Image (cartoon, rainbow, N blue to C red):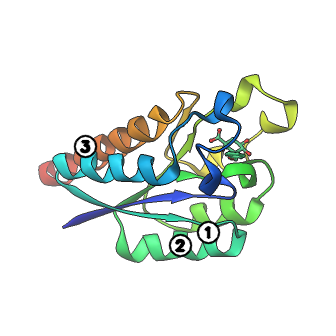
Amino acid sequence: MRKLLLLNGPNLNLLGNRKTDTYGTKSLQNIEEELVELVATMGFELDTHQSNHEGELIDWLHKANETYLGVVFNPGAYTHTSIAIRDAIEAIKVPVIETHISNIHNRESFRNHSYISPAAAGLVVGFGPLSYKIGVYALIEKLNEREREDGEN
Ligand code: CA2
C-alpha cells in the first residue's frame, strides 16, 4: 500500500477546545479520521502522528524517508523557530507539504516568517482545517505526477 504521513507539531492536540475563532471547532482526532477516509478513496493509506517535542518531530521526518511516500506537516510554532526541523526536511528525499490552519501572514509579525517554507515541496495556509485536505490532495497529485513522469522515462 502507498503510505503517507500526517504530522502535527506542538499544541495541535488542543484543537477544537480553545482558540476556535482562529483554529476552528474540529478536534485533531476528527481531522485525522476524515483525512484517513479521504486518502483511502484516493488509493493511499494515511498514518497520523502529533508531538509536542521538536526532536520527536525530527525523528518522524527521518522515519518518513524510509516508510512514507510523502508528508503533510503542520510544524505549529516550530515553523517560526526551528532550523533543526528545516534541516531535517532538507535531509530527506520525500516531499513535505507545509500546512497551516490559519493564515500565518495576516497574524502577529513573529508568525509571518517560516524557517520551514524554503525546504517544503509546497505550502497551504489559511483555509482552516480544510488546509489539511488541500495539503493531502496536493501531495497525492504531486506523487501521481512523478509516477507518470517516471513511467514515461
Ligand atoms: O495555523 C497553524 O496551523 C499554526 O501552525 C498553528 C500553531 C501556530 O503557532 C502557528 O503560528 C500557526 C499553533 C497551534 C496551537 O493550537 C492551539 C489550538 C487550541 C488552543 C490553543 C492552541
**Res 95 → quadrant:** bottom left
Asked which secondary structure carries label 3, the reply is helix
**Ligand 1, what quadrant?**
top right
Residue type, numbered disc 3: Glu
**Residue that lies at the very extreme toward the left in this rendered image:** 152
Tell me: 39 left or right of 15: left
Estimate how packed mark 3 is, as few (under 14), some (14 to 19) or many (20 or more) residues with alpha carbons within 10 Å.
Answer: few
Inter-mark Cα distance, 2 to 1: 5 Å
**Res 130 → quadrant:** top left
Inter-mark Cα distance, 3 to 1: 27 Å
Tell me: 100 left or right of 44: right
Identity of the residue drawn at 35% across and 52% down: 33
Inter-mark Cα distance, 2 to 3: 25 Å
Asked which secondary structure carries label 2, the reply is helix
Pointer 2 or 3: first along the chain:
2
Contact? badges 2 and 1 (CB < 8 Å): yes
Tell me if the residue at label 3 has its CB under 8 Å from ligand 1: no
- The dot on residue 60 is 2
Q: Where residue 111 sits in the image (x, y, percent)?
A: 79, 37
Q: Where residue 26 sits in the image (x, y, percent)?
A: 50, 40
Asked which secondary structure carries label 1, the reply is helix
Residue that numbered label 3 is attached to: 145
Residue type, numbered disc 1: Leu
Q: Where residue 93 sits in the image (x, y, percent)?
A: 45, 64
